[in-house]
Image (tube, coloured by chain):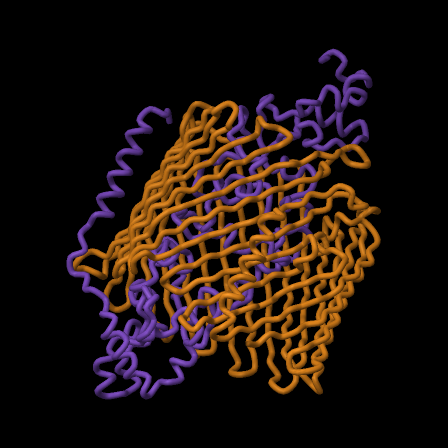
């Protein structure tokens, strides 16, 4: 982990120095200190899980444009703290790209923060074009998690701790050939999971895939696609394995008068050593659309799929319809509806037949130079009549942004979510309210201020409240030096559980030097 | 279905793939030569110098004559078809602006240079394409220096349309999107996976970070091993974007179990009847799958609950 961090910062510094003789760059160096005062149960407010107290050093929104079109970018946040989040990339469009990243995340599981896990993630990816039409790409990621968790439903009042210590390594490599609307890609991906506490869980996963997209010669309004994938997961100790082979094909027809037609088919066989059987999936889908770019469009579709296991088989039939309408250029209305019925054709399955209905409606309006307003509503109903189970989820959100050019920008929104889970022997109901808003002033006498808040309330079977109030002020001393103060309050209360409350006051002071060279 | 014939299916699929991949490219005309691209684009700049300025520093920065490193030649005429007429008669309506085209036509323009899995699936299986969104719905070319030329460089760009999902991420428990430890594209990656939500499915999406729960297990919990294109797997019990319950669980306590299972009669009278709240997973700890027993019971159950289960006299015969 330290090596990765050192390499990332070292690479960035050397690239910056290399570039120093030419072109232009910009970014912010931020030196700060964070103070956290918190009381209550540290495991309940996820927003502060990854906050640390101490001195911080960051390089934010760094960008260096080389004269020859190469570009170096970096965001190195909190390099000195355990929540560091570092990304950097250098590249030239159409020639090469190198990306490096590292971040850490802490999750707290008990009242005093004694039971925690920390994830870290280091990644690198490289792609380059040896010739214009060929891209070679590859990369690797090292991910690890250590610490201890607490059983969620432990009967022990203090909770039973479960030690965690594992690593995952990912790697991939492949090549892509593109030429005038045609593409052929081949890629190999691998993943190793190594559990330091239980080697029986060590496993290796691999995937090989090929895909192609080809416009039909002389009929370039028809595009054909197809691909094949082989995937397997194998337990290292026992050679226990899941494997799957999947093939798919698709065709897109751009018909006259802005009509279009799409068809795709997929076939997949997944086998597992655990049940000595295989599951076959077969999917066909057909979509037809019409679009008038000025006013709107519609799409209708049908999908049929088959899931065939050793003794049982079920089939799904799904219908889809969507449309959009622009009464005036500034406004857009969208609606989408999908329904799916899964019928068990052979034998039985525990959840029986299933019906799913899903719908979405949204509307957006942009006021020229002033702002925008968006409304969205979506609902989902899933019914399994054979076992007396029904899930109904609804959510509506209104979101708006206002720009008062001389004074400030404002954003605000409200979201309402409602869920009803009806089981045969129990029910669960919740209603969520989320209210949020932020205001940021324009600079006035070298001073910029901002304030905002998020309020969350979950009711009915739950009784949870949490909020975050944030405000900041930044004063610009010279053209490129700013002093910034940020104050955050986090509060969480679960009124049904005595122990579950939390309050944190977080103050952050930053001195920011704007770079421009 | 038995496994017999699996190899045959694989061979057939592989053959089909190569048949499609090897369709000859007769009729595809080559792109403009470097000299034509640079000289004709230079003519555009006589009137549209602002376009050159606002492309500077972006991935579409116009290729310069002395740029020997350039493998990809970027110039105005690469995207704006009809430029020949426009050079003769510079009117607004005699040149193609790709952002004003329908998806198939705009994609045809963009795919001259950009054709990854993302661009390819927009034409067929991608829900954004299905809803008739175009390349320009998310990307702008001129005056944009953002990563991948998305309209807004903010990490939560997807949230500008998916406001409902953003709200879910502010629920009691959610993946750490707000701290930028993961991004939408960490799970929703438009590669060759073709399921409706663009996630890679049970075999990669969740296992990328949570391999400790993944199979194969000697005794699978069928719901976690639903090898289906539509739903199933982890999302039957967890709401990945956010939940009012801890650990992304759709329902608290025994609710997630009870959506499929009834409580066995003996459990109802004994465990709950004693006034002790016993959750299913107190004993069925290996609920994601077990290598030890088919009821997913804790392998250490005997020692863990020695006093509760056995010394109490309830299960002394079982011992």
Residue B144: x and y in percent read 46, 73
Question: Which residue is more in the foreground, B48 or B188?
Answer: B48
Tell me which residue sits at (63%, 41%) in the image. Answer: A145
Please tell me how many numbered marks the rendered image carries: 0
Residue A161: x and y in percent read 74, 35
Question: Which residue is more in the foreground, B261 or B10?
Answer: B10
Residue A12, compared with residue B144, is above or below; it is above
Residue A439: x and y in percent read 67, 75
Question: Which residue is more in the foreground, A322 or B36?
Answer: B36
Residue A355: x and y in percent read 48, 44
Left or right of residue A124: residue A406: right
The purple-coloured chain is labelled: B
Name the quadrant of the C terminus of chain B.
top right
Left or right of residue A479: residue A93: left
Tell me which residue sits at (67%, 59%) in the image. Answer: A78
Colour assigned to chain A in the rendering is orange
Tell me which residue sits at (77%, 57%) in the image. Answer: A53
Tell me which residue sits at (36%, 73%) in the image. Answer: B99
Q: Is residue A290 visible?
A: no
């Amino acid at each position: 982990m330290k090596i990765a961090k050192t390499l990332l910062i070292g690479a960035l510094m050397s690239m910056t120095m290399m570039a120093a003789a030419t072109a232009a760059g910009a970014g912010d160096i931020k030196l700060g200190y964070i103070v956290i005062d918190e009381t209550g149960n540290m495991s309940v407010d996820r927003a502060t899980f990854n906050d640390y107290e101490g001195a911080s050093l960051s390089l934010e929104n760094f960008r260096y444009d080389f004269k020859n079109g190469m570009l170096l970018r970096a965001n190195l946040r909190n390099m000195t703290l355990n929540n560091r989040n570092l990304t950097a990339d250098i590249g030239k469009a159409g020639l090469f790209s190198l990306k490096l990243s590292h971040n850490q995340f802490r999750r707290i599981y008990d009242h005093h923060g004694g039971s925690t896990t920390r994830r870290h993630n280091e990644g690198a990816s490289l792609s380059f074009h040896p010739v214009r039409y060929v891209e070679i790409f590859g990369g690797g990621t090292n991910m690890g998690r250590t610490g201890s968790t607490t059983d969620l439903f432990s009967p022990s009042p203090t909770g039973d701790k479960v030690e965690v210590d594992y690593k995952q390594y990912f790697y991939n490599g492949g090549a892509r050939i593109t030429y005038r609307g045609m593409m052929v890609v081949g890629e190999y991906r691998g993943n190793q999971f190594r559990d330091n506490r239980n080697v029986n869980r060590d496993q290796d996963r691999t995937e090989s895939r090929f895909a192609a997209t080809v416009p039909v010669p002389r009929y370039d309004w028809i595009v054909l696609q197809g691909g094949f994938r082989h995937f397997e997961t194998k337990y290292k100790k026992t050679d226990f394995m899941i494997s799957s082979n999947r093939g798919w094909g698709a065709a897109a027809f751009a018909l006259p008068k802005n009509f279009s037609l799409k068809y795709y088919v997929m076939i997949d066989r997944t086998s597992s050593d655990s049940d000595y059987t295989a599951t076959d999936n077969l999917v066909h889908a057909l979509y037809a659309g019409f679009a008038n770019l000025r006013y709107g469009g519609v799409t209708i579709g049908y999908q049929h799929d088959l899931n065939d296991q050793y003794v049982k088989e079920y089939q799904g039939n799904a219908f889809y319809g969507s449309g959009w309408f622009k009464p005036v250029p500034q406004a857009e209305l969208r609606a989408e509806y999908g329904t799916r019925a899964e019928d068990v054709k052979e034998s039985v399955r525990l959840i029986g037949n299933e019906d799913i209905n899903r719908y979405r409606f949204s509307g957006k309006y942009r006021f020229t130079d002033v702002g925008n307003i968006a409304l969205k509503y979506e609902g989902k109903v899933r019914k399994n009549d054979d076992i007396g189970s029904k899930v109904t989820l609804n959510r509506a959100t209104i979101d708006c942004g206002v720009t008062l050019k001389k004074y400030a920008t404002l954003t605000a929104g409200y979201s309402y979510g409602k869920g009803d889970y009806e089981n045969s022997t129990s029910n669960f109901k919740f209603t969520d309210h989320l209210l949020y808003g932020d205001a940021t002033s324009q600079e006035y006498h070298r001073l910029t201020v901002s304030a905002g808040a998020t309020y969350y309330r979950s009711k009915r079977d739950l009784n949870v409240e949490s909020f975050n109030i944030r405000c900041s002020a930044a004063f610009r001393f010279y053209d490129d030096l700013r002093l910034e103060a940020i104050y955050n309050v986090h509060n969480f209360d679960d009124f049904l559980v005595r122990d579950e409350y939390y309050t944190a006051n977080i103050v952050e002071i930053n001195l920011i030097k704007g770079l421009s060279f | 279905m038995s496994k017999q014939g699996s190899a045959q299916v694989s061979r057939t699929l592989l053959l089909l793939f190569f048949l499609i991949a090897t369709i000859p490219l007769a009729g595809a005309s080559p792109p403009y030569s470097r000299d034509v691209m640079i000289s004709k684009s230079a003519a555009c700049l006589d009137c549209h110098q602002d376009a050159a300025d606002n492309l500077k520093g972006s991935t579409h920065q116009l290729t310069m004559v002395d740029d020997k490193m350039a493998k990809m030649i970027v110039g105005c005429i690469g995207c704006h078809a009809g430029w020949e007429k426009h050079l003769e008669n510079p009117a607004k309506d005699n040149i193609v602006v790709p952002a004003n085209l329908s998806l198939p036509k705009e994609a045809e323009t963009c795919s001259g240079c950009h054709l990854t899995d993302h661009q390819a699936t927009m034409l067929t299986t991608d829900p954004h394409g299905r809803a008739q969104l175009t390349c320009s719905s998310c990307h702008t070319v001129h005056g944009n220096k953002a990563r991948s030329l998305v309209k807004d460089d903010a990490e939560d760009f997807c949230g500008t349309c998916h406001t409902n999902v953003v709200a879910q991420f502010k629920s009691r428990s959610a993946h750490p999107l707000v701290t930028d430890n993961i991004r939408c594209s960490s799970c929703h990656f438009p590669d060759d996976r073709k399921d409706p939500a663009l996630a890679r499915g049970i075999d990669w999406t969740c296992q990328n970070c949570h391999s400790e729960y993944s199979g194969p297990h000697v005794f699978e919990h069928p719901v976690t091993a639903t090898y289906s294109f539509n739903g199933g797997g982890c999302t039957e019990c967890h709401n990945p974007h956010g939940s009012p319950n801890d650990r992304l669980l759709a329902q608290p306590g025994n609710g997630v179990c009870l959506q499929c299972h009834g409580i066995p009669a003996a459990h109802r009278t004994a465990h709950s009847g004693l006034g002790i709240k016993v959750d299913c997973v107190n004993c069925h700890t290996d609920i994601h799958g077990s290598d030890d027993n088919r009821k997913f019971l804790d392998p250490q159950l005997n020692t863990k609950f020695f006093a509760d289960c056995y010394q109490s006299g309830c299960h002394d015969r079982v011992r």
